[in-house]
Amino acid sequence: MATQYKTIVRDGLWDNNGVLSMLLGMCPTMAMTTSATNGLGMGLATAVVMAASGLLVSMFRSRITQEVRIPVYILIVAAMVTLVDLSMNAWMHELYKVLGLFIPLIVSNCLPLARLEAFAAKEPVLPSLMDGIFMGMGFTLALTAIGAVREIAGAGTLFADASLLLGPAFKFMEMKLMSPDKGVLMMILPPGGFLVAGLLVVVKRILDVRAGKAIQMGGAHSAA
Amino acid sequence: MKQQRMMVHGMILGAFCLGFGLLLAFTDRVTAQDIAVRAIEDRQNSLSQVIPDSIHDNNPVTDTVAMKDGQGNEITVYRATKEGKVTGVAYEIFGSGYAGKIKLMLGVDAEGKILGVRVLAHKETPGLGDKIEVKKGDWILRFTGLSLGNPLPDKWKVKKDGGQFDQFAGATITPRGVVRAVREGLEFFAANKAQMMGGH
């Protein structure tokens, strides 16, 4: 059992990373990684939705028939997104002002759907919850990394406005590395997103090859 | 046999829709009141930036007049009153930016002088056009104190067009849209002053 969880964690964070290995969820990845803070926020919101929907799909997996599974998965993801959206608006309003923009976008992310189909539909409740959490964390990691590179190269800052997202205590994270005039604007515009994401995929592959791992090409297969 | 199976699938899908529909309806009920309160607080925050506390003793959020602006948009005019006299008004204005509408809140005193302008929503390019936000630059603060006669009408433009307002390096369309929206907002006030300031 313990080795299974270890695999789930490794797969989610690195080996089968949603963005850097499977190249899923590119739409929010391109749109929301103009800064490290935005990437982090989008990643965390997605992780919450992935954990909740993984748990639910796994709970109902024996009731959902093959023929209607896709609409049911979409229903569950959309319901979870709306739930998160409404409760954050009501009870975590400061955070909602920063993240509110990203939350509805989670529905259009194919990564949650891929994990529900590939994992939660077949596995017991606890591993499915873990898969949702760690795939979500891996997504967060990738988005924050892409956002950080784009932000440094484009605007000369790192984690700007992090205190708006995480609270005033995180003011120390906000860094100004160079004057904004020196930034390469293209990195913040959409082409920069493709460039940086592509380069980070290459970096990950080089690291994997160095470590002697077989490269996992895109494909959302079950981890177990 | 086949028909029966189809029914079963339909029932399953229907049951899930019903279940999650109920869950959402319940969440909506629980959160609706808090969300309404938050929306009023937000409104209060953006109003307090364009109407200084010192000029009113009422709550402008609840003292409103509904009007139609020059482009036919429904707008709400928020009034600041002190000892029963209207000392200023605030209302939404719209500019056309590089990537769609820019929504702003304009505060004007009884003489038609700008109390403040703030951006409420926009889709301008991050790092270029977004310097119109007060947290990204002080450009928007330069409107405070200006009026239709100051600067003169032909100077209500960005420098590139022969006016007196700075554009940003790499972005002219955004500030041009904002300057124009503010000028039109002031003209709207001049033309409709009686209705906007009028008695209750």
Image (cartoon, rainbow, N blue to C red):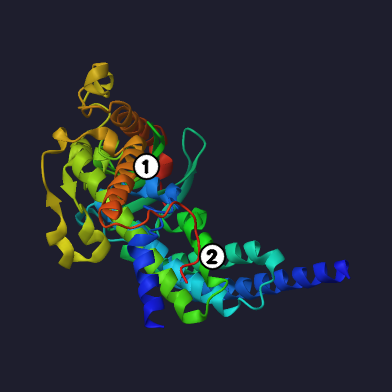
Where in the figure is residue B188, as x and y percent of width and height? 39, 34
In this picture, is B40 found above or below B132?
A: below
Classed neighbour count for the residue bearing mark 2: other residues with Cα under 10 Å, few (<14), some (14–19), many (≥20)? some
Please tell me the numbered disc located at residue A118.
2
Q: Is residue B12 left or right of residue A55?
A: right
Where in the figure is residue A195, as x and y percent of width and height? 32, 38
Quadrant holding the N terminus of chain B: bottom right
* Gap in angstroms between the C-alphas marked 1 and 2: 39 Å
Q: Amino acid at mark 2?
A: Ala
Image point (57%, 68%), residue name: A76
Determine which quarter of the picture holds residue B7. Answer: bottom right
Which dot, 1 or 2, sits closer to the camera? 2
Q: Residue B185, can we see it?
A: yes
Quadrant holding the C terminus of chain B: bottom left
- Chain for numbered disc 1: B
Q: Which residue is mark 1?
A: B122
Q: Is residue A100 left or right of residue B26?
A: left
Q: Amino acid at mark 1?
A: His
- Chain for numbered disc 2: A
Can you name the residue that lies furthest to the top here? B162
In this picture, is B148 found above or below B28?
A: above
In this picture, is A57 found above or below B101?
A: below
> Are discs 1 and 2 located on one and the same chain?
no
Q: Secondary structure at mark 1?
A: loop
Classed neighbour count for the residue bearing mark 1: other residues with Cα under 10 Å, few (<14), some (14–19), many (≥20)? many
Determine which quarter of the picture holds residue A216. Answer: bottom left
